[in-house]
Image (cartoon, helix red, strand yellow):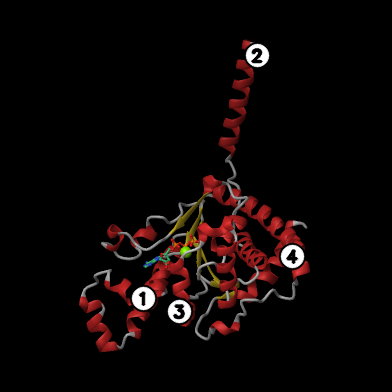
Amino acid sequence: MTDKDFLKQAKKYSEPFCITDGKKFKLKQIDPAETLGLSAEDKLKAKDALECGVELLTKLQDKLYAHDRWAVLLIFQAMDAAGKDGAIKHVMSGVNPQGCEVTSFKAPSAEELDHDYLWRCAKRLPERGRIGVFNRSYYEETLVVRVHPEYLASQRLPDTQTKKRAKQDGQKDFWKQRFDDINNFERYLTNNGIVILKFFLHVSKEEQEQRFLARIDDPAKNWKFSMKDVNEREHWDDYMHAYEQTVRHTATEYAPWYVVPADAKWFTRLVVASAIVQRLSALDLSYPKLSTDELEELQAAKQALLAASDTTN
Ligand code: ATP
Ligand code: MG
């Protein structure tokens, strides 16, 4: 498959899941088991296509690095066992580690809790020319923190920002404020040349159960199993509500959400690779062109090198 063929296909696989205006978004619009007509027999074909996508991403990253104007931020959010780690590992497998940094955000430390919630993420933003991957992100602030209000309490925000405000405006407005702040932050990053793509890997509750069972039954996967993850299933509906609200309020033209079906891992990876490649290939990336003076300097350097080797040989 040529790069051009892959790009054509990339549009087909990424666009149906791309949300740029969340106002009317409903989670039930996207079936976690969706594969756009590809069946289990097409799995090998999908894997071949993914390989082409990974190769193309390698080329685009090389250009992104040399061009040194844009940075790319990829955000991954999902319920446990939805395949974040696998998607990152496979899609980024061809990327030069020098131009890429992955950060996993866990429950905040005491030091992190002493700061505003964007602080720890702002420190890990990609430099110009690089790709930054956030494995979880500031979006946990409208997901796990919304589902578990005790996390909000541990942030020790002034009462005027939480309780009183909640009483005056209704609890909803606190989250609306967070969405507005996140949108403004992402607008600011975009204005600074940071291209943002957000992926919600949407797995079904049934498939998650199967994956947890596999983690218990397969000794090689035992280390991935956590009782805490199983307990979180009790809050499944709250999480889905929080995800839906988050996409509704923070899917924008400049920082779209991709709600990616995640019951078939091979399909998830194809969609993620397609979205990234499509976005990067739409940027005005080019290798820097040397000026006439710089080209002349290169020729002079070549002559000097050759002259020096003539005298030493
Ligand atoms: P894996 O399980 O595949 O290793 P993971 O991303 O689930 O990856 P864990 O260490 O299991 O990593 O979980 C991180 C936990 O940290 C998640 O439960 C997440 O909800 C929680 N977390 C992340 N950010 C915040 C936050 N701002 N406030 C509270 N909890 C958070
Ligand atoms: Mg986990």
Residue 232: percent from the left, percent from the top? 44, 74
Establish if 304 lies above or below 166. Answer: above
SS of the residue under disc 1: loop
Pick whichever of labels 2 and 3 is earlier in the sequence. Answer: 3
Q: Is mark 3 within 8 Å of ligand 1?
A: no
Establish if 182 lies above or below 241. Answer: above
The residue beneath circle 2 is 310
- What residue type is disc 4 on? Lys
Quadrant position of the N terminus in the picture: bottom right
Q: Nearer the viewer, residue 66 or 51?
A: 51
Q: Closer to the observer: label 2 or label 3?
A: 3
SS of the residue under disc 2: helix
Pick whichever of labels 2 and 1 is earlier in the sequence. Answer: 1
Q: Is mark 1 within 8 Å of ligand 1?
A: yes
The residue beneath circle 3 is 234
Pick whichever of labels 3 and 1 is earlier in the sequence. Answer: 1
The residue beneath circle 4 is 43
Establish if 167 lies above or below 136. Answer: below
Q: Nearer the viewer, residue 279 or 82?
A: 82
Residue at mark 3 to residue at mark 4: CA–CA distance:
33 Å
Residue at mark 1 to residue at mark 4: CA–CA distance:
38 Å
Residue at mark 3 to residue at mark 1: CA–CA distance:
12 Å
Q: Closer to the observer: label 3 or label 1?
A: 3
Answer yes or no: do the residues labelled 3 and 4 have beta carbons within 8 Å? no
- What residue type is disc 3 on? Glu
Q: Quadrant of ligand 1?
A: bottom left
Q: Closer to the observer: label 3 or label 4?
A: 3
